[in-house]
Image (tube, rainbow, N blue to C red):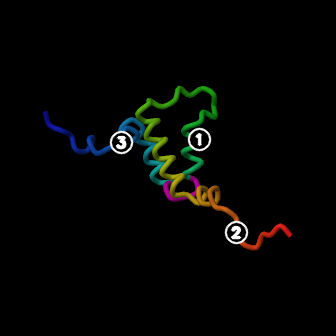
């Protein structure tokens, strides 16, 4: 049996939903990436069946990576400078 290297190196998302992988690749690194991923993972229409579990896991991993890299995380986890605070 011959391994097809082009398929072997691709994710489930790329193989099963190439149009989504392409669009996400185009949006990666832009402010639109977070909302695009969120809209993929939450059914806004009420009629979608959802992704296969292997694709959903990859999308969640990408969302986690994006969260770790995003300014949103930095803003969410940052603490205000309270060096000038006093009780009176």
Of mark 3 and mark 2, the one earlier in the sequence is 3
Residue for point 25% across, 44% down: 6
Residue for point 44% across, 30% down: 53
Asked where in the image residue 38 lies, by quadrant, the reply is top right
Residue for point 56% across, 28% down: 48
- Reply above or below: 75 against 11: below
Mark count: 3
Q: Cα distance, mark 3 to mark 1?
A: 20 Å
Asked where in the image residue 70 lies, by quadrant, the reply is bottom right
The local secondary structure at tag 1 comes to helix
Farthest residue to the right: give it: 88
Of mark 3 and mark 1, the one earlier in the sequence is 3
Of mark 2 and mark 1, the one earlier in the sequence is 1
- Reply above or below: 49 against 2: above
Q: Which mark is residue 81?
A: 2
Where are the magenta residues, as a range? 28-32
Q: Which residue is mark 1?
A: 39
Q: In which quadrant of the rendered image does the N terminus lie?
A: top left
Q: Which residue is mark 3?
A: 11
Where is residue 28 shown, x and y percent of the image? Answer: 49, 55
* Front: mark 3 or 2: 2
Where is residue 10 shown, x and y percent of the image? Answer: 32, 44
Q: In which quadrant of the rendered image does the C terminus lie?
A: bottom right
């Amino acid at each position: 049996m011959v391994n097809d290297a082009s398929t072997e190196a691709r994710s489930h998302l790329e193989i099963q939903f190439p149009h989504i992988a392409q669009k996400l690749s185009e949006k990666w690194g832009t402010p639109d990436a977070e909302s695009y991923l969120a809209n993929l993972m939450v059914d806004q229409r009420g009629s979608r069946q959802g992704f296969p579990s292997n694709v959903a896991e990859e999308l969640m991993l990408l969302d986690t990576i994006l969260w770790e890299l995003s300014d949103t995380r930095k803003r969410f986890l940052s603490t205000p400078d309270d060096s000038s605070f006093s009780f009176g």
